[in-house]
Image (cartoon, grey):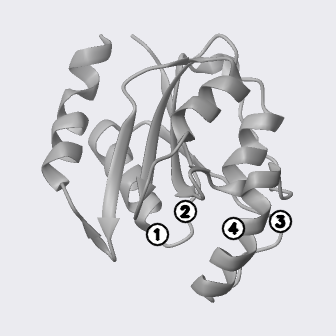
Amino acid sequence: MKKRLIIFYSYSNHTREIAKKIKEKYNYDCIEIKPVEEYSDDYDKVVQTEEKLVPLDYQPDILPIEVDFNNYDEIILCTPVWWYSVASPVNTFIHSYDLKGRVVIPVATNGGYLGRTFENIEKVTGCVIDRPLSLKYDGDILTNPYEFEDWLNNLEEVVE
């Protein structure tokens, strides 16, 4: 049986809630990516700053992730979409940790356009990307919860 790990970063809690639901259903190990310096609670300020930094491949310092990735076959990587790519703390993670030999299952939460999020994950990690899922939010409302539920309910069936 394949061993899976959920790794996520969440700014507004949408991505955290998705990661939590996956963990609750399958009891996978779960680790949160945490920036050394926390982001402002002022959403507009974060958006203005990240709009400039994300296109520059910004990689803020994150707290160390203490896990032996050799113990996992697949990584479920959950990220918000920031300026058409992964959130900056996730960008640091994928540049800093060697995931080669694993399958990455990317889950992106966004309020707009997915952009090149999945392509960037694949390019940086060099991993096989499988079963990608893009989840749109309108404010705090998941616009298609049935899509998520279907993906979640079929996750084990698809991979076995």
At x 36%, y 38%, the residue is 133
Quadrant of the rendered structure where residue 23 is? top left
Quadrant of the rendered structure where residue 52 is? bottom right
Dot 3 alpha-carbon crowd within 10 angstroms: few under 14, some 14 to 19, many 20 or more: few
Q: 135 and 18: which one is in front?
A: 135
At x 73%, y 57%, the residue is 54
Q: CA distance from mark 3 to mark 2?
A: 14 Å
Instruction: Relative to 65, say whether 55 is above or below.
Output: below
Q: Amino acid at mark 3?
A: Val
Q: 17 and 110: which one is in front?
A: 110
From this viewpoint, is residue 136 visible? Answer: yes
Is label 3 in contact with label 1 (beta carbons under 8 Å)? Answer: no
Is label 2 in contact with label 1 (beta carbons under 8 Å)? Answer: yes
Is label 1 in contact with label 4 (beta carbons under 8 Å)? Answer: no
Which residue in the protein does label 3 denote? 36
Q: Earlier in the sequence, mark 3 or mark 2?
A: 2
**Residue 63: x percent and y percent?**
81, 55
**Residue 70: x percent and y percent?**
68, 17
Label 3 sits on a secondary structure element that is loop
Q: Earlier in the sequence, mark 4 or mark 2?
A: 2
Q: CA distance from mark 4 to mark 2?
A: 17 Å
The quadrant of the rendering that contains the C terminus is top left
Left or right: 118 as drawn, with respect to 125: left
Q: CA distance from mark 3 to mark 1?
A: 18 Å
Which residue in the protein does label 1 denote? 13
